[in-house]
Image: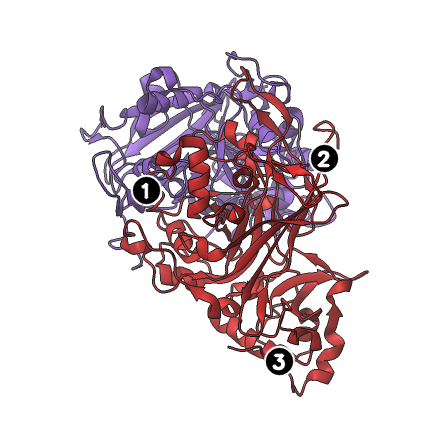
Chain colours: A purple, B red
Amino acid sequence: MPLMKSWVASANDATHPFPLNNLPYGVFSTEGSHPRCGVAIGDMILDVTAAEAKGFIDLIEEPLFDLPFWNPLMEQGPAVWAALRNRLTGLLAAGSEEQEKIEPLLVAQAEAEMHMPFAVSEYTDFYAGRHHAQNVGTMFRGPENALPPNWLHIPIGYNGRASSVVVSGTEIRRPWGQLKGPNDSLPRFAPSQRFDIELEMGAIVGIPSDGPVSVQEADDMIFGYVLLNDWSARDIQAWEYQPLGPFQAKATATSISPWIVPKAALEPFRCNTPERDVELLDHLKDVGPMLYDIDLQVTMAPEGKAATTIARTNYNQMYFSAAQQLAHHTTSGCPMNTGDLLGSGTISGPTKPERGSLLELSWGGKEPLTLDSGETRSFIEDGDTLTLTGSAKGKGYIIGFGDCSGTVLPALPKPYKR
Amino acid sequence: MPLMKSWVASANDATHPFPLNNLPYGVFSTEGSHPRCGVAIGDMILDVTAAEAKGFIDLIEEPLFDLPFWNPLMEQGPAVWAALRNRLTGLLAAGSEEQEKIEPLLVAQAEAEMHMPFAVSEYTDFYAGRHHAQNVGTMFRGPENALPPNWLHIPIGYNGRASSVVVSGTEIRRPWGQLKGPNDSLPRFAPSQRFDIELEMGAIVGIPSDGPVSVQEADDMIFGYVLLNDWSARDIQAWEYQPLGPFQAKATATSISPWIVPKAALEPFRCNTPERDVELLDHLKDVGPMLYDIDLQVTMAPEGKAATTIARTNYNQMYFSAAQQLAHHTTSGCPMNTGDLLGSGTISGPTKPERGSLLELSWGGKEPLTLDSGETRSFIEDGDTLTLTGSAKGKGYIIGFGDCSGTVLPALPKPYKR
């Protein structure tokens, strides 16, 4: 599929993240106005809440965009998703007869503040990137025992904390926690010294389920994708995670990019999962190309300094797809709901510059990174801004996600005094 | 405090779970009517939604009981909680001048169906019962390494799945999952053969927080308590839980008792946590008697057979209180919300008949239980009904919780065919 032309001129630039082929969903506000639903087109946002109120979008009997999140659309399912996408394309395509009426409903992105695009129902984070699991396992258990015995058979995951999911731009407060170094006799309570990122993609569940679903059904339930940074306190995690997994180490915040990229916009970029070392059990088998070819990168900018690109990788490095993760998530009968967010797990490629966390990039702090400013980093320092970006490259256009960014603030001087 | 007399005669029985001293909160419906808020008094339920609509309860400007869950009250905080309790006591006490007007708002519990009493925001399950952790650790790692190194320092917990929390009486479908026995070369996908209970108490967060809170602040945030059965598939857990903790093993269902017992009703039963082997760090230290003296028991009834009591223990066996768990939960800055549910962890006492799970009672299946019917059990069989009950014993009265019960149905004949 080539670039689809829009009457919004900026959307026709071959390097713009938001061409007519994309049409991602966000929630925005402008000065003095309430948050409302919008769709990105070039440098502009179409105010979808206003477009519906004025009758230009009329999908079902009830209003779908009168609340400041996309969940009401998400729960409608693929037919209504397709109808909206079709209607938006019609309104915004070059030559649209409705251009004159729609132009007043456009807002410049430069003037908009972005909010959480959906209400997160529950948040699950997986560990399904093979190179990441291999790297972390090698550091902790040696290369022979790097992958746990179950790893090639099930997408390992844990339940995260939905209340901690925030939109890009939200400042992140360095957490306190219980820490105990290998040579300490007792733990102490202190700010995390090994605060880190995890480069991930987030899949958003549109249609709920109530019982086990197949991989194909799971894929059909997914509404769209965001970039996701699962902020992680490695020192808190090291002390707390046995035997029940990460808890407070992963509860400070998880940032997502502000625009939900519709699954439909990513379909041209479908690609295969890697070859399997061991055959998957039937209920998890691939049912076609299950991943997407999406370039990802991470930049780090110390306070007041330019950003350095510290990692480049691709979503095609995942071992298990979001649909396989979701199918596994339902095997026990676990009900899934509209607004459930599934983190892919950290995405790392096979070589060092492709690693999606500082833990891997600095090899547990043993090989600090040197930034373009000359500073070195093993983990995040106060004032650092970490930014994830991602895009799928089409012929003459790209599908972008918008930045997923956060600046780390110093820990509270003392807990309990806010 | 002695038994407080009510004009509802059944509430004055010294062995009744719902005297005027209790006044627990539930959501009920009767044939042909919508679910609404109610308070248990003796064998009856006061229709609180109707009482508010008729002007007998008037706490704040907005209605608090027009939705079928208690969250709107829960988020109001202790002053409004106390005002409601005071008003209900006035309406229902012996000699109340309003008896005649209130009597028509009573519904027999025998005619009511109970629903979830609150909307669960997120669900966290802890592992803070020492005898349970000791027993399970001994089975898996031997008695010397039974307690993980962190166990005496932090209340170990993991995020559970809020969507799987159901009210007592809901049937529980045996889950499918990936299983791999110690002698199997590969995992297989099959119904769980080691499906189990966990006897727990659930603490319900009333007031939200946004940053670390002290143990005292955490205690003030708690609205009330329920009985909680964290249904657990031990064979799924054994295969999946390394390295990120339990996931599908605990996602089939968690049952809670239908009545939220207000914290105020339990205050006379405050008791101390056990002596500490190692001093807790300041942010987790006890700030007074932190537990409650609540007798707990579990019965098991095979299909069509009488129930056998299989365990008796007490909530005073916990090592960490709900307030300590909640304070720990916020250390990282994790936001807590109205309706968050915290499972205590399995409550076991020091002797065999005090163990709160079949895993412990049958010692991993090596010592099957014999029920009164003559049947034996290592784990749950299809058709078995498991019931938790609990009560605090006052002078001349008890504070009961109502049953937390569930019957296990056979696994789906094949997954994906519902």
The secondary element bearing badge 3 is classed as: loop
Residue A350 location (% of width, % of height): 38, 15
For mark 3, name the chain.
B
Residue B101 location (% of width, % of height): 72, 82
What residue does disc 1 label? A407
Whole-Å distance between the Cαs marked 1 and 3? 59 Å
* Label 1 Cα crowd, 10 Å radius (few <14 / some 14-19 / many 20+): many
Identified by mark 2, the residue type is: Pro
Residue at the spot 72% in from the left edge and 27% down from the top edge: B414
In primary-sequence order, the first of circles 2 and 3 is 3
Contact check, label 1 and label 2, Cβ < 8 Å = no
For mark 1, name the chain.
A
What residue does disc 3 label? B5
Q: Nearer the viewer, residue A232 or A107?
A: A232
- Can I make out residue A284 in this image? yes
Image height check: is B92 above or below B128? below
- Can I make out residue A335 in this image? no
Label annotation for residue B410:
2
Residue B41 location (% of width, % of height): 66, 71
On whether disc 1 and disc 3 are found on a single subunit, the reply is no
For mark 2, name the chain.
B
Residue A367 location (% of width, % of height): 22, 23
Q: Is residue B40 left or right of residue B212?
A: right
